[in-house]
Amino acid sequence: MKRRTKAPVPDPSTFPTRRYDLVKEFTIALVVVALLTAGLAALFSSPDVRPVTLASWARADGGDFTASSVAELGATSGTAQYGPPYNNTPDAAQKLGPVGLQSTAGVRIPVDTADDFVLGPLRNAPEPRAVTAALAAWDAGSAARHQAWTAAYSDALAKSGGGVPAQGNYGPVPVLTARLLQLARGGALDGQLRAQGKFYETDYTRSLLFLSDGSYLESLARAQHLGGDQWGMMNETGNFPGQAWLWLYTFWYQIEPFKSSGNADALIWGLMALLSLVLILVPFIPGVRSIPRWTRVHRLIWRTYYREQTAERGRRE
């Protein structure tokens, strides 16, 4: 048998070559991607709205801040009456039938609005003698006196329409709230409500609760179409597209009986859980699982496949 000779190995230098500058290609790609990213971000990104703080609230609407401070002192604010996880306010929990969903976990973030939002920050800051005397007078008063003072001053503020309230027996409340307004305008209150004794102070829970008890934050939200009755859950600040996939969840808040129910959160959660369960069980529900077969929608979707199968059978016949 004649041995087969091996083909000679070609010399790489005989092949045509083309210069390729990897650094140049990488630099061009990096610049193009960076420019596209910056341009698309400028056109389609969400607007950078300045954060709402206690300081900005106090400077923009001192009357609303003062009225909210009085409500915190008198434990009549939304947070004070919310129930778990902040406090044990009776009959305030969201329920689904006989099951108290909100109260099941109990109080996990205890909040005493009078002490945490007003009295505590005032005690922790260097205070003039008048404020120190007002704190002592508050501590010496009974719970009934506290309620009487805050209720009277709250009514006086409402009647004044943002002006100076009429003279009355308000106890130390005007002095306390006036000093708290000064602290807030100077920015000290934001820091005090975030201070939890940790290295990184990133817990904004108390600041947000205080803000939500006033009308200022809600007015800003409604101006951006973020209110609950404005489909706010699926909107974005400005004229930017928001979370369209949340339409079904926020839809229920727009209709009765959920729209006027104080128990809407629990009811809608239960309804969405039920709808999700029905969707999962569609393949096991008699009648419902046969709808695609009855409607023959699948043949419309896969019409090309069925057309080819029909033609193939015709050729075979």
Image (cartoon, grey):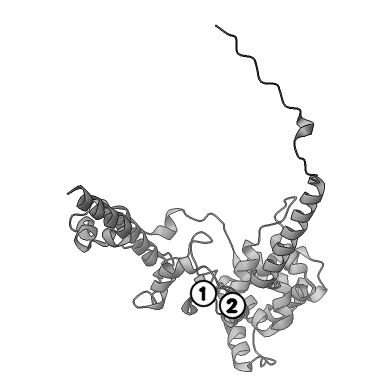
Q: Which element is circle 2 on?
A: helix
Name the residue at the front extreme. 2
Nearer to me, 26 or 224: 26
Q: For mark 1, give the secondary structure.
A: helix
* Picture disc at residue 232: 1
Residue at mark 2 to residue at mark 1: CA–CA distance: 9 Å
Say whether residue 311 is left or right of residue 55. Answer: left
Please tell me which residue lies in front, 44 or 112. Answer: 44
Q: What is the quadrant of the N terminus in the image?
A: top right
Residue 103 image-quadrant placement = bottom left
Q: Residues within 10 Å of mark 2 (few under 14, many from 20)?
A: some
**Compared to 127, does 312 lie above or below?**
above
Quadrant of residue 61 within the rendered picture: bottom right
Q: Amino acid at mark 1?
A: Gly
Q: Which residue is mark 2?
A: 221
What is the x, y in percent for residue 72? 60, 73
- Left/right of residue 207 with respect to residue 123 in the rendered view: left
Amino acid at circle 2: Ala
x 63%, y 93%: residue: 161
Residue 66: x and y in percent read 67, 80
Residue found 65% across the figure and 66% down from its top = 207
Q: Please state which of residues 16 and 127 is positioned toward the viewer in this rendering.
A: 16
Residue depicted at 60% across the width and 84% down the height: 154
Q: Earlier in the sequence, mark 2 or mark 1?
A: 2
